[in-house]
Image: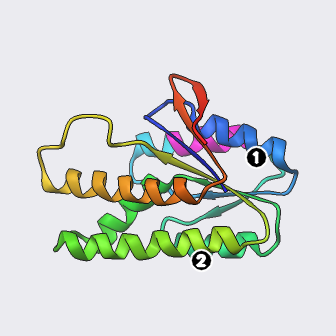
Amino acid sequence: MIFVTGGARSGKSGLAEKIAREKGKDVTYIATAEPGDGEMRERIAEHRRRRPSGWRTMEAPGNLPEAVGEALASGGVVLIDCLTVYISNLLISQGIATGEHFRKAIDREIDQLVEICQSGNGRVILVSNEVGMGIVPDNHLARTFRDAAGRANQKLAAAAEEVYLCVSGIPVKVK
């Protein structure tokens, strides 16, 4: 597994796509975003334009572990873009009635994702935002999201063979 992280518009997706092109011809791109508004539809369109036509695309705004398992069944390279959007989707779908309930649900999802990535028949490249480098948010929802993303990133980075941090378009190999 290769884990690529960084801030917004730091070059994460571009780096992950470059690595996928270098690692193999059989690439499955798993997209987690949903086109909720015009700006997000444009972001999704931009990502689609960059992808080579031969790549298979799967949309997985929910149940990412299942989608990854299906993609890995045929081998090749699986590029997941992106984990933090997926966590946001889970937060919206499950709500945050109790922070502890959401934390446990995310931990289970990420543990399952790590297990599938490590036992699968291929290489996984996972993109995720580094969201914890700024100020502590002033509201519960933002803190819940930031904490869930931070814990997920730690687990996935620990399990990955390689980790890259993108800073202003420059990839820095961390592990």
Expressed as whole percent of the image width and height from the top left, the position of residue 85 reads 44, 54
Q: Is residue 39 left or right of residue 158?
A: left
Q: Is residue 79 above or below residue 46?
A: below
The three-letter amino acid code for the residue at tag 2 is Glu
**Residue at disc 1, secondary structure:** helix
Expressed as whole percent of the image width and height from the top left, the position of residue 31 reads 58, 56
Expressed as whole percent of the image width and height from the top left, the position of residue 171 reads 60, 29
Is 167 magenta? The answer is no
Expressed as whole percent of the image width and height from the top left, the position of residue 15 reads 66, 36
Q: Quadrant of residue 136?
A: top left
The three-letter amino acid code for the residue at tag 1 is Ala
Q: Quadrant of the N terminus?
A: bottom right
Label 1: how many Cα within 10 Å (few below 14, some 14–19, many 20+): many
Which residue is at 56% across, 24% downward?
A: 169
Contact flag, marks 1 and 2 (Cβ < 8 Å) = no
Specify which label sits upstream in the sequence, 1 or 2. Answer: 1
Q: Quadrant of residue 22?
A: top right
Q: Which residues are magenta?
A: 43-51
Badge 1 is on which residue? 20
The circle drawn on residue 66 is 2
Give the overall secondary structure of the magenta segment.
helix
Question: Which one is in front, 25 or 55?
Answer: 25
Q: Is residue 14 above or below residue 68?
A: above
**Residue at disc 2, secondary structure:** helix
Q: Is residue 29 above or below residue 175?
A: below
Label 2: how many Cα within 10 Å (few below 14, some 14–19, many 20+): some
Question: Which one is in front, 166 or 13?
Answer: 166
